[in-house]
Amino acid sequence: MIIREKAGRITDYAGLDIEPDWLDLEWFETRKRILHKKTCRGLAVSMKFLAEAPEITEGDVLYADADRLVVARILPCDCIVVKPDSLFETASLCYEIGNKHLPLFFEDNALLVPFEMPLYRLLTAQGYAVLREERKLLQPLKTTVSPHASGSSGSLFSKIMQLTNS
């Protein structure tokens, strides 16, 4: 089966009496334009989103007909979880993680990063209250700010620092 576009959200199909056929995805597979996987019931699926990255989220219906609903389910993974106590701490954490070019997620007032031991050690050594937990990475933290600003515009970090110091 070839999937070229999403068919909606699982809530759009709430009235149907069809049991979902889950397509389990790792967090890093949710933005892949081309992907070959099998659903939990063994259906071979080829996703080909040629125009742009699909940004698949949990509960996205990838295929629907009278007999089948193929629905995305994001698998939990080993994560670093940090709950910042202040805006300053949030800015510092985002700066440290951003400098490593790692994906950052936000959920329940906590910053989440896929687990990497060097980052875990660094954040622990800097005094942050760091947890290691199994979590689903569902809410990517997005920014449109250029990471390497030039001139007087400043970086996102410097702008947040100015806000916390005033």
Image (cartoon, grey):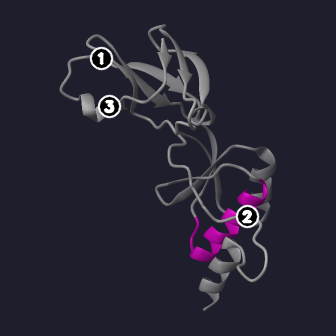
The numbered dot on residue 59 is none
Q: Position of residue 146 (x, y in %)?
A: 69, 64
Which residue sits furthest top?
A: 42
Quadrant of res 149: bottom right
Q: 41 left or right of 53?
A: left
Residue identifier under label 2: 147
Q: Position of residue 80 (x, y in %)?
A: 65, 49
Q: How many marks?
A: 3
Looking at the image, tell me whether mark 1 or mark 2 is earlier in sequence order: 1
Q: 50 left or right of 119?
A: left
44 or 83, nearer to the observer: 44
Residue range corresponding to the magenta coloring: 84-100
Measured in 3D between alpha carbons, the distance from the residue under mark 1 to the one under mark 2, in whole angstroms, is 44 Å
- Dot in front, 3 or 1: 3
Q: Residue at x 54, y 41 (%)?
A: 135
92 or 122, nearer to the observer: 92
Measured in 3D between alpha carbons, the distance from the residue under mark 3 to the one under mark 1, in whole angstroms, is 11 Å
Check disc 3 and give the amino acid type. Answer: Ile
Residue identifier under label 3: 10
Quadrant of res 162: bottom right
Neighbourhood count class around disc 3 (C-alpha, 10 Å): few under 14, some 14–19, many 20 upward = some
Q: Residue at x 77, y 52 (%)?
A: 119
Residue identifier under label 1: 19
Measured in 3D between alpha carbons, the distance from the residue under mark 2 to the one under mark 3, in whole angstroms, is 36 Å
